[in-house]
Image (cartoon, rainbow, N blue to C red):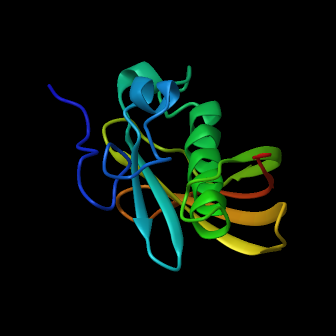
Amino acid sequence: MTGPDHSGPDHHGPDRPGHDATGTAKLLGLSLEFDPGKGASVSMPVTPDHANRHGNLHGGLISTVLDTAMGATASYLKGEGGKIPFSTISLTVNFIAPMPLGGTITATGRVMGGGFKTVFVEGIARAEDGTLVAQASGTFKRAPI
């Protein structure tokens, strides 16, 4: 079994400086894609290793997928195409529906406002069938250069 392919032009990897896969992304099998002018999306296959005691995707991992998509969106749209990282200042997640095991969760981010140093981003996470799993709002700060 191999991990996600991060080698294409719309994925992080050697051809996208500033978008190298983090240790967390590698550990969880996150796949990052960019949509010019819109933002980032992050997908993760949901395996039994990600389960909570109810047999669904753990809420902390849903939050991680959302945080990654939202931070990448801030960096991509407000940080010179992703060359400048943004750090999470605050993140609020509302869980709407359980995410079952065996599918893929995808989170997308959208910049809602802010300025040069601070950006407000909203995110949504959906199951493969389109079910809304969670919504989030966050504040992200541009890293010092």
Classify 115 as above or below 128: below
Q: Residue at x 43, y 49 (%)?
A: 17
141 or 43: nearer the eye?
A: 141
Image check: 38 left or right of 136? left
At 64% across and 41% down in the image, what residue appears? 63
Give me the residue at 66% from left, 61% from top: 74
The residue positioned 58% from the left and 46% from the top of the image is 68
Left or right, residue 93 beside residue 54: right
Q: Nearer the viewer, residue 61 or 24?
A: 24
The residue nearer to you, when weighing 117 against 113, is 117
Image coordinates of residue 129 in percent, x first then y, are 36, 62
The image quarter in which residue 4 lies: top left
Q: Position of residue 3 (x, y in %)?
A: 24, 32
Q: Residue furthest left?
A: 1
Within the image, what quadrant is residue 119 found in?
A: bottom right
Is residue 118 positioned above or below 32 on the image?
below
Total labels: the figure holds 0
Q: Give x and y (percent) for residue 26.
A: 40, 28
Q: Residue furthest front?
A: 145
What is the quadrant of the N terminus in the image?
A: top left
